[in-house]
Image (tube, coloured by chain):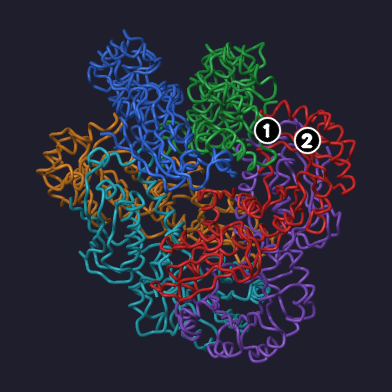
Chain colours: A green, B blue, C orange, D cyan, E purple, F red
Amino acid sequence: MLTAPYALQYEPLLLAALAEDLGSAGDLTTDAIVPAAAHARADVVARGPGRVAGIGIATAAFALLDPAVSMTVAAEDGTDVAAGTVLATVEGPARALLSAERVALNLLGRMCGVATATASLVAAVAGHRARIVPTRKTTPGLRTLERYAVRAGGGADHRFGLHDGILVKDNHILVAGGIPTAVGRARDHAGHMVRIEVEVDTLEQLDEALALDVDAVLLDNMRPAMLAEAVARVGGAALTEASGGIDPTTVRDVAAAGIDLISTGWITHSAPALDVALDVTV
Amino acid sequence: MLTAPYALQYEPLLLAALAEDLGSAGDLTTDAIVPAAAHARADVVARGPGRVAGIGIATAAFALLDPAVSMTVAAEDGTDVAAGTVLATVEGPARALLSAERVALNLLGRMCGVATATASLVAAVAGHRARIVPTRKTTPGLRTLERYAVRAGGGADHRFGLHDGILVKDNHILVAGGIPTAVGRARDHAGHMVRIEVEVDTLEQLDEALALDVDAVLLDNMRPAMLAEAVARVGGAALTEASGGIDPTTVRDVAAAGIDLISTGWITHSAPALDVALDVTV
Amino acid sequence: MLTAPYALQYEPLLLAALAEDLGSAGDLTTDAIVPAAAHARADVVARGPGRVAGIGIATAAFALLDPAVSMTVAAEDGTDVAAGTVLATVEGPARALLSAERVALNLLGRMCGVATATASLVAAVAGHRARIVPTRKTTPGLRTLERYAVRAGGGADHRFGLHDGILVKDNHILVAGGIPTAVGRARDHAGHMVRIEVEVDTLEQLDEALALDVDAVLLDNMRPAMLAEAVARVGGAALTEASGGIDPTTVRDVAAAGIDLISTGWITHSAPALDVALDVTV
Amino acid sequence: MLTAPYALQYEPLLLAALAEDLGSAGDLTTDAIVPAAAHARADVVARGPGRVAGIGIATAAFALLDPAVSMTVAAEDGTDVAAGTVLATVEGPARALLSAERVALNLLGRMCGVATATASLVAAVAGHRARIVPTRKTTPGLRTLERYAVRAGGGADHRFGLHDGILVKDNHILVAGGIPTAVGRARDHAGHMVRIEVEVDTLEQLDEALALDVDAVLLDNMRPAMLAEAVARVGGAALTEASGGIDPTTVRDVAAAGIDLISTGWITHSAPALDVALDVTV
Amino acid sequence: MLTAPYALQYEPLLLAALAEDLGSAGDLTTDAIVPAAAHARADVVARGPGRVAGIGIATAAFALLDPAVSMTVAAEDGTDVAAGTVLATVEGPARALLSAERVALNLLGRMCGVATATASLVAAVAGHRARIVPTRKTTPGLRTLERYAVRAGGGADHRFGLHDGILVKDNHILVAGGIPTAVGRARDHAGHMVRIEVEVDTLEQLDEALALDVDAVLLDNMRPAMLAEAVARVGGAALTEASGGIDPTTVRDVAAAGIDLISTGWITHSAPALDVALDVTV
Amino acid sequence: MLTAPYALQYEPLLLAALAEDLGSAGDLTTDAIVPAAAHARADVVARGPGRVAGIGIATAAFALLDPAVSMTVAAEDGTDVAAGTVLATVEGPARALLSAERVALNLLGRMCGVATATASLVAAVAGHRARIVPTRKTTPGLRTLERYAVRAGGGADHRFGLHDGILVKDNHILVAGGIPTAVGRARDHAGHMVRIEVEVDTLEQLDEALALDVDAVLLDNMRPAMLAEAVARVGGAALTEASGGIDPTTVRDVAAAGIDLISTGWITHSAPALDVALDVTV
């Protein structure tokens, strides 16, 4: 089930983006050229093929600028579209359509880009158990929307941030002086609703972590053969997550190792935006 | 001269990003494992080669979380670095270093990514007059920082948003019923400090715009030969800007046409992030 | 064309003003005396003659306090009205009308005051080419609305702030060590959409600036005869702006010198408010 | 005793004003021309004579922009200064001095203007018991600072807003159906710390109000002779406040009638700003 | 008359509470289990007996989350209800009902708790002149709503905060060096709409305060016999307020001493919440 | 380990509370009576016995109002103190001490109240395995601080809100049409870091939940004998949490049933505040 965030979770972002583009002086070009009474209709169109995400969220920018704008969605989030597909149609005061266009498209292009990149990885691991999950390597301020886009792309959730899951990483282990101490402290501190995952770089570390009965292990930067060995050692006693160097060319081999989860920052920090545009009819 | 934004322009973004990652419950892992009194030192390191941008801005996240963190910059914005280069060193309470790490790196990686992409285009057009400029296709909420990163990459400025320049685009022309009406209205409305640029798709439109004595023309999606013809027709009477389909493989041919400005959204909406990391020493 | 700001540009100001007046405890008098069910109708009336500005913006305060208030505008922004003219009529819950009255009138009186002062200068220069423009000497937080009021008064726009135009002033020249260095640095740094204006105090400085081919010159505190000489020297090669000591008694002589633009802070920082009132009918 | 607001009461206003002027792109002129390392010193100077108010508040803008700016106040709030007087000296990074100049001066000029106008009224009523008090006709968002300026001008306080005092006005009386009902409801509702004042237009209304034992009466738009008669009827049983048409030419006659308080919106909504400037030394 | 705050006074609190509970990731449970199209109806029910306060305010949380939720109030603020009473019914998207439930109930339970505690004190002093009033010992951020709840419980208002009344307390007297100096300074500084109350611990201090003709005296921590003696000494020349150690078991004896006002922090800082729940029908 | 939130998590709350108390007009009493130069020292004292929580957080209010205030903590969070114990000493400008006093004490009293109530339950279950955990029945806006106070009282964490744990409650089961469907949907939707707990009212429901291999079961409103039977049936296959009707008189019997976790809203929504005061020395 693909559940969109409530408007109160993304409206502040859209308002800030509109303020960023309009400044205090407003849209000089549109205000000069387009009469206040002019009415228009416009299609939001995908210029390239991709997976839709954020069509209702991003296009809410139009009605935020002017409540007289109405909108009809033609391609729901989570669907694949060909180049040229109309994703939504907006209609209302021409000024609002032109002045909010870039804000809506910037957000939509980014969200579709994340979804499309995710979908490509999901497709690449088809037939394997692995689920594609995001990391915390997201754009500052956009994590809720980028993670929603990952789900629209067929990915699953990881912890959202530092506050809703324990992931013991190399630096924690360094400070604690070892995996057992680090995991022990984490377990003492953690509430009963929190899962504990430990990042390991070697099979020795993996054995240490498994001996502590953790919920999941993050196998960092291991090659497929070593991942397969790790999966074998875990033997279902914990969830296995692989990360490091994941992209469309490498992901299938990782999945083939039998990994449960494959996480990658690439889908959020480096995925190219989908090319989306607004075709206006006066 | 590379002028960084004042802290009051980017601190709200960092605070929001910290809040996004820490949530209300804070960093469960670090709070559990790292003693409050633990002190650490860490290097911010580039894992790949690239152009630095945002080193002082992004790493301000550490001191925002805990004012006891101090910082020394080793590679200034605007410099090129090899993989493995230490960009800055931070020192202070270990908890703050670990809890703010991801926010600092997410922003730094993105800014360096934009600068690196820009620098690659700037290098590609070396020897030609063309300057690389950004578009308004930036990440919602990050335009100030992404444009600063473009400058760190050797690019120049375009208008910032809708409020500080008039760019008459196809839809404005459509609503106005023609370039002369659109430009006329723009000129009547515009203050004397505002420049007027007109987007044209054909040489006929170009002639129309030139007849109106506009400050600049945006030659949209023209091929190099047509760009050269356009530059010839303009004959120095206006600035020429080319856009559409610009990337490292196409940019040199565009520049060779004698264009003044080359704008591309690619450097802001689709540039891959630079891989940056935090190496901690206890 | 008189283009009003979008509500999202002025609503925060109205909300802050309502909060300032209502505090946390609300309107003690109205809450005590006026029943929740009482309904009223009220006219917003100009007590003196003037130019209308902000009628729709300022009276939005009523509906922000209670969405059940409706409003009809009788005198549009930009029109001249005689004392006693009804500018708008509001109708709805009596409490909201009385509790938001002062906020609406404070803003309306100020905006009409700015428009009226501007209109008096515009009238004074009738027959001359000069346009009246505002400065940055506006009320903190109200610049968007005060500049809109200037336009309602028949004035034109200047740059909005420090971010959308380059105005090289005496202190910049002092730091740079001369006009050529200052303008040179400005030109190197400025994007192609930015105009450059230089403030000059003497005819020698004027010649220096003209030699640099700047877009406009600000002739500061020159007397009419000297202004005429300056206009002659410029000879159409740049826009001419006069400032300093402009008020209704001096403006015509300045305009007569052939100046393009006359800027004055008086219309925003010292214009008396128009007397506006709310006449309630139960 | 002149008590300045805490910084947390005015800093948000200064930050908003800086954001308004700097926009997202910053100070184009200063950033281009002034090197980051340039240091300067500047005097804040009164160009005309007046009463100082806000010298510490307004000039806090410099250090908000850059904490490296230091400040020394030379003329405290509440003092009278001649034209040419140095009010304060600021020193630090030249960029911050130039970029925050206008924000600081706009606020200072306005506050000194209010104080100066108030002081002129206070001087005009010297020898009489009357105190000059402000109304709620203040600039949206600036009430705290404008009322502080009134006190710096020698004025006293009125209620701050709708929330901290009951002032029964004509419309309340209209809705309630008469003064006794209105005052009765106010008294039932009011907490024991709240004073009740009633606005009256006629001597008959005055008698009605006095019979209800109110704390103060607002004598609206009465001529001096009628004010004197009103004062006689009150006979010290309530405070008397006069309002309507108060300015420097009329205030003394009103005071001579023996009034306790004279309120006027003129000092806040229409007082001309004091001319203040920044003289920079490199 | 029970006057509810305007929505703009409490909506920010509800939005913050929703954000606190939903975080950035939203309601994981409801999003997973409840289909977007599911519709539900639910009763807000009092599980125990009490006085209603905040039914319209607290339940506004549902519609803030999703404007498609409608609401009908069954038991108005200020009424007493038995256990099991339906206070309101909400209807709309099931997700919004479940996701906003806790925010609405947390606020409602607290407000009803305050009202119920207040009502118990009001009932306890029935037949005496004393009114029950709140102190400033309220929950940070909730004072407007807790004081509204006090009024719903039959209590009256005290000053709202530090800004709308003068209450000279022991520490002020200590700093000033005595009651006469403290009251003298207060009177010099206070506007004419401000009442002055003085806290006294002894009858000697009471005499001192009375000699200064203050508006009210706060008799702090006096036993009933001493309170009666104090009331006698005051003899109607000032309002008398008793505080310290007030609870349902002690309040009647205090009232019997003839006190005008009884203030207690217990009703706001320590009143148990009323048990309220949401009974959902699919 | 007791980990306090970062200042950026609680400073906005303190600033809002100061604004609530000071309003726009400030502290009328202190501003009138206490000279700006007066310096004072004050002890924060517990008037009753209790568990300390928030001493550093709440007293940060003083320095937020005036950075010249310094503070020394004498009794750390998590310690038990007798009546009369000095918890901290603050020193600085007397105005700031008096004006921020109530905000600091209101928050401190509430946090110590929560910690003290929690500690009383923790003490009551000594010798049993049960840990005391909070619910989401917290004060709107204060959840981070109240949960921190619970930990200072010896309690453990539950999920923070709706966003960081799945708790399938009666209404979810109702909408889904049964526990298996509800848990199935939850499992499909949940990320791998999320634990799933199910609320059950009967032993039949318990068996259903256990068959689904959930992480924890919430045994709602069961009597001790039934709890013991439930614990036996679970047999360590899931964590057991008891809730409903928990208070100091009932908690020990619940713990004796062998429950892992006991949750109660009483410690946050109805715990009486600890009486804390500020003893000032001039």
Q: Sort mark 2 into few (<14), some (14-19) or many (20+) by Cα contacts within 10 Å.
A: some
Instruction: Indicate left or right for F142 with D4 as reference.
Output: right
The picture places residue D109, in percent across and down from the top left corner, at 32, 60
The picture places residue F64, in percent across and down from the top left corner, at 47, 59
Residues tagged 1 and 2 counted as in contact (Cβ below 8 A): no
- Reply above or below: C220 against B142: below
- Reply above or below: C35 against B57: below
Instruction: Indicate left or right for E85 with E1 as reference.
Output: right
For residue C249, which quarter of the picture?
bottom left
For the residue pair E174 and D222, the one nearer the viewer reads as E174
For residue F76, which quarter of the picture?
bottom right
Residue C18 visible, this angle: no
Q: Chain of mark 2?
A: F
Amino acid type, label 1: Val
- Reply above or below: B74 against C110: above
The picture places residue C44, in percent across and down from the top left corner, at 53, 57
Q: Which mark is residue E168?
A: none
For the N terminus of chain A, the image quarter is top right
Q: Chain of mark 1?
A: F
Instruction: Tell me the element at label 2.
Output: loop
| Label 1 in the same subunit as label 2 | yes
Q: Residue farthest to the top? A: B225
Residue D24 visible, this angle: yes
Residue of label 1 = F194
The picture places residue D87, in percent across and down from the top left corner, at 26, 64
Amino acid type, label 2: Ala
Query: Label 1, label 2: how many angstroms apart (C-alpha)?
Result: 15 Å
Residue of label 2 = F238
Instruction: Indicate left or right for C41 with C82 as reference.
Output: right
